[in-house]
Amino acid sequence: MALPVYASTAERVWHYVFHVFCAGVFVFLIAPILVIIPLSFNAEPYFTFSEGMLRLDPAAYSLRWYRDFLENPQWLHAVRNSLVIASSATLLATTLGTIAALGLSRAEMPLRKTVMSILIAPMIVPIIIAAAAMYFFYSQLDLAQSYAGIILAHTALGTPFVVITVTATLTGFDRSLVRAAQSLGAGPAFTFFKVVLPLILPGVISGALFAFITSFDEVVVVLFLAGYDQRTIPRQMWAGIREQISPTILAVATILIVISIALLTTVELLRRRSLRLRGVRE
Amino acid sequence: MARAAVTPGQLTAADGTPLKISLARAMRRRRITAFLLATPLLLFVLVTFLMPIFDMLTRSVANPEVRTYWPEVTAALADWDGAELPEERVFAALYRDLVSSREARTVGKVATRLNYEMSGMRSLIMKTQRRVQRIEPPYREAFLDLDPRWGDPDVWKLVKRMSSPYTLSYYLAAVDMRFDPDGNIVAQPENKRIYVPLFLRTFRISLLITALCLVLGFPVSYLLATLPLRVSNLLMIMVLLPFWTSLLVRTTSWIVILQQQGVLNDLLVWIGIIGDQNRISMIYNQTGTIIAMTHILLPFMVLPLYSVMRTISPSYMRAAQSLGAHPWEAFWRVYAPLTLPGVGAGCLLVFILAIGYYITPALVGGTSGQLISNMIAYHMQKSLNWGLAAALGTLLLAAVLILYWVYNKLVGVENMKLG
């Protein structure tokens, strides 16, 4: 989008206005996330830059909020809960979602559109409605205030992402490879694990990461279904924002940002790998 | 299995069945296999997700309280014509039901249910049940002595109406209407209308957020789509990072930035645009909700727009300009119409997500930034009027499903882009 030499004044002005506007939008997108990182090292219990911080005085920075986080049994319990719930939900969602995607991507799948819309529903239905409905229903089954209830709910919320990413990967999948394996005598299970899975693995993993982040970041269902024992990191942050706001949540937020950067990088690398495997050139 | 008759000259499979039948059979088997693969997840979603939703739908019309806890009154009122005050046997039935529901501690549920329909019912019933030991036959006089409101036919009409197993009254309440004593549907008095204005506010704010996302997202998508891939992939990270960052983290950042002692106000004071005394309140109100939600939903606009714009060849614009079109005209008449599928997909997606949003308005919305979801949560957790929560939820769900249906027609769920 370099400006050609023959551009008129109006075009020049427009060019710069356009680029400044876009830069503004990028700042709007990224600044709120970046601003929180230095603030989490604030030595004072404030949510804004102190004068010392602006002077880059080392005394104005400290790790006290990180220490606070690491020494607080409530937070550590929440971290354990989040990891247990998110990994169980991810495992379940990825298994169920991948198997379903294998069926959905076959040409002979009957009622594909209907089945697909049902399977995507957990992603579309507003979360508050899902949470309220699950609260009514799971209470009757004695699943409210239990790990099992939250894991089941989070699995349901995570499956659409797995179905979407794996089906997308399977559209570029060469089905003759399956026939080749079968003609060489491989059974269905062997074909799946040795031929299909390695090729669609990037899609499966990014689906799993989506399912993981969905559960890891989910707070509304937890608000309704979880008891005090099942509090997760987002639930603890929710309480932190609503009740006893302290910069500890900024430290937690910074840690979560680092995790999301790691996840984003992984998904991006997987996407490129998947494209390369399918022979698409970028 | 009966073997189909084979006419000479017809193609047959190795076992002698006509090829057509054999193929159809194989095809059917493959269709069943494909469907069986999807079955486990289908059942899972059915049990863990769709059944709860269905359960909620029934809850929005269910009306079990009076019927279950006051069975004798229900039976005695069944053939009451509603013209004058019920006879002695209805009051006797009320006495027996009050005694038994008092013992079972269920009388409060009936009282609360009736109070949703007519204020004052709760205090009337609770007062009566406290003094129920003093009541002696003849019951009619005793009840009327205790509280003259028992002589009001409207009270009895209400009890009779509420003894039916299903009711529309929660839905009526959700659209600011009610039954009058004679069972006609009338609008709520003006000062009691809260839900229709709240629905309208939700739609208005969602539309505004969608428009803001389009205004901010369109130029950025255009820039990303026209830059070389190496650069645009780098810039894309700026769009994807917020997408992957925890919602609560993003909401926290906006609190940090926008609050009165926050970063932005500090900056404005330091520059000297505003004085230290009149810091702007940008959060815990509608402005806060709109800013934070626009930030959160912007990636959902950029991603579909970008994927459509990538496919538009830049030579179209050049062709239009070489034929004499002004750059603006080339843009509006050639480029913009081609982006419409992306604009439609992005706007629908953002709007669908916005009208059901809960977390951000709850945390940064104050009172003026609350949306319909927050009212559902309020009735679920605070007022415990679950029937009304279910009815409001069903109405919101209906709106979302209609939009989802349009989205599905327009884009197709399987084409949804996830970064």
Image (spheres, coloured by chain):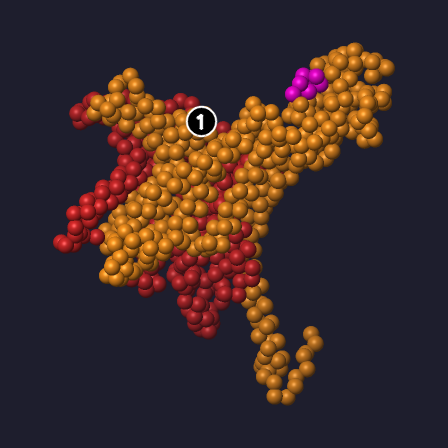
Chain colours: A red, B orange
B73 vs A222, nearest the viewer = B73
Residues in magenta, as a range: B119-126
List the residue tagged with mark 1. Answer: B368
Q: Residue at x 55, y 48 (%)?
A: B45
> In what element is the residue under mark 1?
loop
Residue B234 placement, left or right of B405:
left
What residue is rendered at 24% in x and 24% in y? B273
- Farthest left residue in view: A5
Q: Is residue A221 visible?
A: no
Up/down of B231 relative to A71, above or below: below
Where's residue A226, x and y in %?
A: 51, 33
Which residue occupies the extreme front position in the image?
Answer: B324
The answer to whether residue B360 is above or below residue A118 is above
Q: Chain of mark 1?
A: B
Which quadrant would residue B149 be assigned to in this image? top right
Q: Nearer the viewer, residue B34 or B188?
A: B188
- Residue A8, visible in the rendered structure: yes
- Mark 1 nearby-residue class (10 Å; few <14, some 14–19, many ≥20): some
- Seen in the image, is A216 located left or right of residue B233? right
Query: Relative to residue B48, is residue B24 depicted above or below?
Result: below
| Quadrant housing residue B66 | top right
